[in-house]
């Protein structure tokens, strides 16, 4: 986990946001056996921008609804509770950082990658025959939030972070290495701290912390290994390098996650199709 000096630097320099109130309330309703999808839809509908984003996501080609939903209550009823949590989290997280648009950072590109990683992680989790500590819906949250440390750093550090980000891209440097040298912590550390603050399971915190490795942290942690591989595969699919995407999960990793080779080929096909169906 995040070492003590890095934790202190993050606390001194960054504002780690709390869990959006709508997610707190939706979580409470989902845990209440007497509440249904209509109750949740009514809560979401109170925030007009959030409701509009939820409807846009719900009506996207990815979810393949037969009829277009015109209200959050209808969307909640059609999607079901498990999918609903993911859709509301996606909409709420994106909305939380909407003010960073037009700041010289490709916000939409980051969200598209995060959403693709979320969907890929959940798909892999459903195909894995290994016992995992998280449900597929929780893997979706890991993928969605794996890079959120970037926008938290941008939000607090502004141009200083943007300069670090752009320099790393220009020099072909690994971003988390450049962040570590410049700030004493990386977006992986920040994302892990946010995950703790938001009450995510310990396995999810580790997956966000170690989605760039190091390898020794992935060899004994199937949850982190799955998210790390989903992240890399999503990048390669987005780059159009399907040969590299199919090679992402090598035989050792496939054995570790108890995946068959056909699962790997199918996840590449899934990610390629999902990429064109993402709504931000």
Image: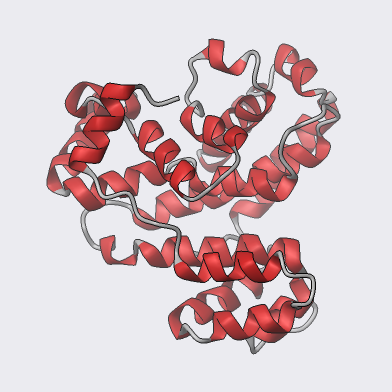
**Residue 268 placement (x, y as % from top left):** 70, 38
User: Residue 140 versus residue 113: which sits nearer the camera?
Assistant: 140
Q: Is residue 101 above or below residue 51?
A: above
User: Residue 28 versus residue 192: which sits nearer the camera?
Assistant: 28
**Residue 68 placement (x, y as % from top left):** 70, 84
**Which quadrant would residue 41 be assigned to in this image?**
bottom right
User: Residue 271 versus residue 224: which sits nearer the camera?
Assistant: 224
Q: Residue at x 82, y 37 (%)?
A: 127
Q: Residue at x 79, y 70 (%)?
A: 33
Q: Is residue 233 above or below residue 180?
A: below
**Which quadrant would residue 34 be assigned to in this image?**
bottom right
Determine if residue 65 is in view.
Answer: no
**Which quadrant would residue 26 be assigned to in this image?**
bottom right
**Residue 249 placement (x, y as % from top left):** 68, 22
Q: Is residue 52 left or right of residue 63?
A: left
Q: Residue at x 70, y 67 (%)?
A: 30
Quarter of the image with the N terminus in it:
top left
Q: Is residue 24 left or right of residue 177?
A: right
């Amino acid at each position: 986990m995040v070492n003590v000096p890095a934790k202190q630097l993050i606390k001194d320099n960054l504002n780690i946001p709390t869990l959006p109130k709508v997610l707190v309330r939706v979580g409470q309703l989902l845990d209440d056996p007497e509440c249904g999808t209509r109750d949740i839809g009514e809560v979401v509908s109170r925030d007009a921008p959030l409701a509009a984003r939820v409807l846009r996501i719900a009506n996207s080609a990815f979810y393949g609804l037969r009829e277009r939903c015109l209200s959050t209550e209808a969307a909640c009823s059609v999607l079901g509770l498990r999918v609903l949590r993911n859709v509301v989290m996606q909409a709420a997280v994106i909305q939380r950082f909407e003010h960073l648009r037009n700041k010289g950072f490709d916000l939409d590109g980051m969200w598209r990658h995060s959403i693709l990683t979320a969907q890929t992680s959940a798909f892999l989790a459903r195909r894995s025959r290994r016992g995992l500590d998280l449900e597929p819906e929780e893997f979706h949250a890991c993928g969605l939030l794996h890079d959120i440390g970037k926008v938290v750093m941008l939000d607090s550090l502004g141009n200083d972070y943007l300069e670090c980000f752009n320099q790393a891209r220009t020099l072909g440097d690994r971003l988390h290495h450049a962040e570590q040298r410049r700030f004493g912590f990386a977006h992986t550390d920040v994302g892990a701290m946010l995950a703790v603050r938001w009450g995510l399971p310990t396995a999810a915190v580790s997956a966000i912390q170690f989605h760039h490795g190091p390898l020794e942290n992935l060899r004994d942690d199937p949850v982190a290994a799955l998210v790390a591989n989903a992240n890399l595969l999503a990048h390669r699919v987005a780059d159009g390098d399907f040969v590299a995407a199919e090679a992402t999960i090598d035989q050792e990793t496939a054995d570790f996650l108890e995946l068959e080779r056909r699962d790997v080929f199918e996840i590449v096909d899934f990610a390629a199709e999902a990429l064109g169906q993402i709504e931000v």
